[in-house]
Amino acid sequence: MLKVYKFGGTSVGTVEKIQAIADRILSEPSHQHVVVVSAMGHTTDQLVELSGSISASPDPREYDALISTGENVSAALLSMSIIAKGKSAISLNGSQAGIYTSNGHKRAKIMHVNPSRIQDELNQNKVVVVTGFQGISETNDVTTIGRGGSDTSAVVLAAALGIKECDIYTDVDGVYTTDPRAVSSAKKLTEVSYDEMLELASMGAQVLHPRAVECAKENGIILHVRSSFLPDEGTRIKESSTMELNRSVTGIALKKDESKISLVGIPNSPGIAGQLFSTLGEQGVNIDMIIQSNEQINETNTITFTVSEDDFSSAKTITESVASQFPGATVVGDTDIAKISVVGVGMISKPGVAAKMFQTLGNSNVNIQLITTSEIKISCAIASSDAQHALQALHQAFDLHLA
Ligand code: ADP
Ligand code: ASP
Ligand code: MG
């Protein structure tokens, strides 16, 4: 049987941990293994920092060339360990593994996978160790696919190799009702639907990369999030089951690196929002939440939106250039913003979730700055200083400690 799975950064954080993974692989000699690995520990963070010591906006191609190297190290070390223990293995980088991406850097999209080299190596009875997080563009350049992207690398390989369940080994033993490091009463979930997991991951639950969930859903691959260190069953991400409908909220996600920009005092006339957001889009800035409000007395509008902190300075510059076209318009920015989101398919059939969320935040003295909703999610932008307190209060209010 062929298994495709991924080990995250903490799981390959030391040589001893890498050797333990090699032992685990050797203990299953009747299986074929494709193992995707992340960079060791905080290597990628250190590489990002290193690039920042050269330039605040490093050349994107060279940035990817640099930050992709962490995975090369862990893949070679794991392959070396397996070989040293007497089994054939080979490490393949993104290009050798046939992972083809779009041309953009930092957040390139995987376009297709040609698994023929992987298949050849498996046929030669080798364990195949693949670098996560990277691929090769049409122009033959190394690309990276976004922070946390090794999950996605594993899922696209599982899809290309026709595997229907992909294990994601990490430093927690499953997906919890919220980050168990932030709320100690968080409970492990047995199953989470693709749609809920996609919302949780997109809203800041770091445990899975959103595109990994998307790709698993598209290909009907069950994701099994589990501990690298314990043998226990983890959480399965799959098509929704009736079980989830019994609860209105399945989980809560917190995203701390948000920022808010307001364009204040613009005329109440058509076209300005279109101009602002199309310019932001052209510059690759992802907009998150948006509100527009109207000042009745002087007939002006204010547009407020949130972007991730990484995009704050470019988004603010673009907004200032739009403001400069309108006498009296100003731009106000705030980087101390967090976004808290409650997620659950059960809220479709159970009214009152929004009311309970807003009341709980109000009773906790947390001011809501922006709100967005989808069918299965309600998000509020709040001050960063309120984030932890709000998370605890909502987790308690929705009885998730009893899940
Ligand atoms: P890896 O390096 O294995 O990819 P990550 O650090 O990317 O691991 O993701 C695992 C971390 O995700 C956990 O250590 C945990 O703090 C965090 N996390 C956030 N939300 C959740 C959640 N709902 N359930 C489990 N872990 C979560
Ligand atoms: N090493 C990369 C990162 O830290 C990719 C990953 O871990 O999934 O973002
Ligand atoms: Mg991760």
Image (cartoon, grey):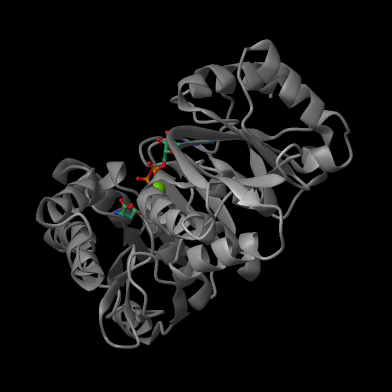
The residue nearer to you, when weighing 381 against 324, is 324
Residue 305 as seen in the image, left or right of residue 87:
right
Check the image and report above or below for 281 versus 168. Answer: below
Give the residue displayed 48% in from the left and 33% down from the top. 337
Q: Nearer the viewer, residue 296 or 194?
A: 296
Kindly indicate the quadrant of the structure image that contains residue 116: bottom left
Residue 172: x and y in percent read: 43, 35
* Residue 49: % across, % down: 17, 48
Q: Is residue 220 visible?
A: no
Left or right of 320 in this view: 64: left
Instruction: Name the spot of residue 340 as percent of width and height, x first.
Output: 58, 33
For image coordinates 10% across by 56% down, the residue present is: 54
| Horizontal arrangement in the rendering, residue 105 relative to residue 71 (left or right) | right
User: Is residue 260 something that shows in the picture?
Assistant: yes
Residue 178 pos. (x, y %): 56, 30
Q: Which residue appears at 30% of the width and 43% of the height?
A: 11
Give the image quarter of residue 62: bottom left
Name above or below for residue 65 compared with residue 334. Answer: below
* Above or below, 172 relative to 9: above
